[in-house]
Image: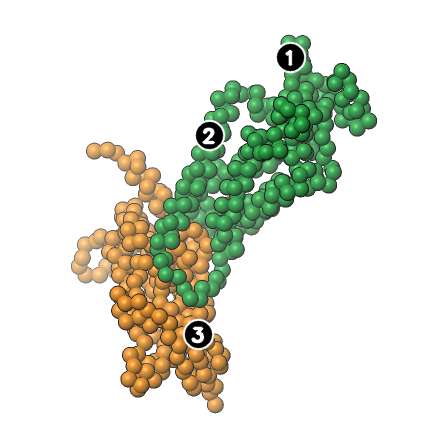
Chain colours: A orange, B green
């Protein structure tokens, strides 16, 4: 028979963006160890609805670890204690009967809480809008093998493209810096031939937008890499720094019209 | 942070290697001080000093603005905040930096300006004077260097360092501060490569190890001098190392006083 557990949850409840939030403590009973963390929260919400209370709001969509919607800090670690795992893919067998679990939203100035555990992550969209694309003739799709790309480059770009934009890096960073997210996006596009043409413009624009959104600066402590559910490496931040420095120098010495 | 840090990282190594000459004898460290002060015009020495102070100012300015920006980016913290992989050194850079700044100020007041009360090594009044001889002959190959028939004099750095580190709390402060410098460097040395993009997964591991080694070398190189003084291994030499043998030192001191 499957094991079950009783848990105490300390959950951040906040009615709206403008109201002040507090922690509420709830008990959940008979949680199956095979259920996911979000399913456990669904159980809690069902209980709350039955009691005529407001259910806990949290972002979720695919529930298979690829959409980047789920976003909650579980016991002090974004997405919880399992390495390279999103909250939706986190299973309750990693917790034990009688445990108290603290659940908080991402904490960062650019990510204001909308409700309970839901935060506004549109700053990431604006970073993408400022450079996370290639400018090319629209039309029918180009043949996949029209531009040869070496295996090493393709692998590297794929590792960078694995970023699902969940924001755990910002949440984990003691400075609420978005360098890992921006680094992954810049490394992805700048390393491929299609993206190289706009490399400098893209790097400068995306960093400027990132700074403008109010994210903190990187102090190279590496907490983002540890929290990232897709294991994006600090190498992507080094890549961003390298491309940024190069772009700045080129920009400085560009011919004056 | 990275570029100003690089200047300071290189400076501490040079400073440490310079200091270690005290183990080669009083005449060597005194001659080293003489070279630093007299070889180039005073303006060059001041230029170097200003560049170093300016670098520290830039380093502090960068740290302060970065800290303020970072505080603003996280107005509300977590109820529970776990650290997964960030090193202790990396999380305490501000604290180690602030203590190091206090140390640098004390260190300059102590050995450069020589204005710390009770430690004015070249004080005019006899009572507050700590060193027997503040000016000693410059010694080369065991003999005093003559210039225009006169003995060329130099400041008695050896005795100043030994007298300075005989005060237990001064020695303790120097050892603690250089320990913090070791911590500061174990993060900073490797971090500066990341900041300018000269790092990848392989080099991160290598540079982290190099940073740890660099930090420890700097710590041991600096801390060994107060330790050696406290252990009685380094002694004052009012002759400036003219004669290294202990027996003859007394005789020379007498003749100098005549």
Hey, which quadrant is residue B3 in on the image? top left
Q: Chain of mark 3?
A: A
- Element type at marker 3? strand
- Provide the secondary structure element on which disc 2 rests: helix
The reply to whether dot 2 and dot 1 touch (C-beta < 8 Å) is no
- Residue A182 rendering spot, x and y as whole percentages: 34, 55
Residue at 42% x, 45% y: name it. Answer: B63
Per the image, the residue denoted by label 2 is B50
Q: Residue at x 49, y 57 (%)?
A: B86
Q: Residue furthest top?
A: B148
Q: Give the mark, 2 or 1, whose residue is nearer the N terminus.
A: 2
Tell me if label 1 and label 3 are in contact, CB under 8 Å: no
Residue B135's place in the image compared with B53, above or below, is above
Q: Chain of mark 2?
A: B
Which label is found at residue B147? Answer: 1
Place of residue B118 in the rendered image (x, y in percent of width and height, measured from the top left)? 62, 33
Asked if one can make out residue B210 in the rendered structure from this viewpoint, the answer is no
Q: Secondary structure at mark 1?
A: strand
Q: Is residue B254 left or right of residue B30?
A: right
Residue B68: x, y in percent? 38, 49
To which chain does the residue with label 1 belong?
A: B
User: Which mark, residue A101?
Assistant: 3
């Amino acid at each position: 028979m499957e094991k079950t557990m009783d848990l105490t949850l300390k959950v951040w409840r906040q009615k709206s963006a403008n109201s002040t939030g507090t922690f509420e403590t709830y008990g959940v009973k008979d949680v199956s160890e095979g259920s996911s963390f979000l399913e456990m929260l669904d159980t809690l919400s069902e209980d709350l609805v039955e009691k005529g209370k407001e259910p806990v709001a949290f972002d979720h969509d695919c529930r298979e670890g690829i959409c980047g919607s789920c976003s909650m800090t579980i016991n002090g670690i974004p997405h919880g204690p399992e390495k390279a795992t999103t909250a939706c893919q986190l299973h309750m067998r990693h917790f034990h009967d009688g445990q108290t679990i603290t659940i908080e939203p991402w904490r960062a100035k650019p990510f204001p809480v909308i409700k309970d555990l839901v935060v506004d992550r549109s700053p990431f969209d604006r970073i993408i809008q400022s450079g996370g694309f290639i400018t090319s003739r629209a039309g029918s799709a180009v043949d996949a093998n029209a531009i040869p790309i070496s295996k090493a480059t393709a692998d590297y770009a794929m590792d960078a493209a694995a970023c699902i934009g969940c924001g755990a890096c910002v949440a984990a960073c003691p400075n609420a810096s978005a360098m890992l997210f921006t680094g992954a996006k810049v490394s992805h596009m700048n390393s491929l031939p299609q993206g190289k043409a706009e490399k400098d413009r893209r790097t400068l624009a995306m960093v400027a937008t990132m700074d403008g959104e109010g994210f903190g600066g990187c102090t190279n402590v590496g907490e983002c890499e540890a929290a990232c559910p897709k294991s994006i490496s600090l190498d992507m931040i080094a890549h961003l720094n390298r491309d940024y420095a190069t772009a700045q120098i080129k920009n400085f010495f560009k011919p004056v019209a | 942070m990275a570029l100003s840090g690089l200047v300071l990282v290189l400076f501490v190594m040079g400073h440490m290697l310079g200091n270690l000459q005290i183990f080669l004898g009083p005449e060597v460290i005194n001659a080293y001080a003489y070279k630093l002060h007299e070889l180039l015009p005073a303006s060059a020495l001041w230029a170097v000093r200003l560049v170093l102070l300016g670098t520290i100012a830039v380093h502090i300015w960068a740290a302060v603005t970065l800290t303020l920006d970072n505080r603003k980016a996280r107005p509300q913290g977590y109820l529970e905040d776990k650290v997964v992989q960030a090193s202790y050194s990396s999380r305490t850079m501000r604290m180690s930096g602030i203590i190091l700044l206090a140390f640098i100020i004390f260190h300059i007041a102590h050995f450069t300006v020589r204005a710390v009360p009770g430690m004015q090594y070249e004080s005019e009044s006899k009572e507050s004077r700590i060193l027997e001889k503040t000016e000693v002959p410059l010694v080369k190959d065991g003999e005093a260097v003559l210039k225009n028939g006169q003995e060329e004099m130099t400041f008695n750095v050896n005795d100043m360092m030994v007298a300075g580190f005989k005060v237990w709390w001064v020695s303790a402060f120097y050892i603690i501060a250089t320990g913090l410098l070791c911590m500061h460097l174990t993060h900073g040395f490797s971090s500066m490569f990341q900041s300018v993009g000269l790092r990848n997964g392989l080099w991160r591991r290598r540079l982290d190890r190099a940073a740890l080694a660099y930090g420890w070398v700097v710590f041991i190189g600096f801390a060994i001098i107060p330790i050696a003084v406290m252990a009685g291994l380094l002694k004052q030499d009012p002759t400036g190392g003219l004669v290294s043998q202990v027996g003859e030192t007394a005789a020379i001191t007498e003749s100098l006083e005549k």
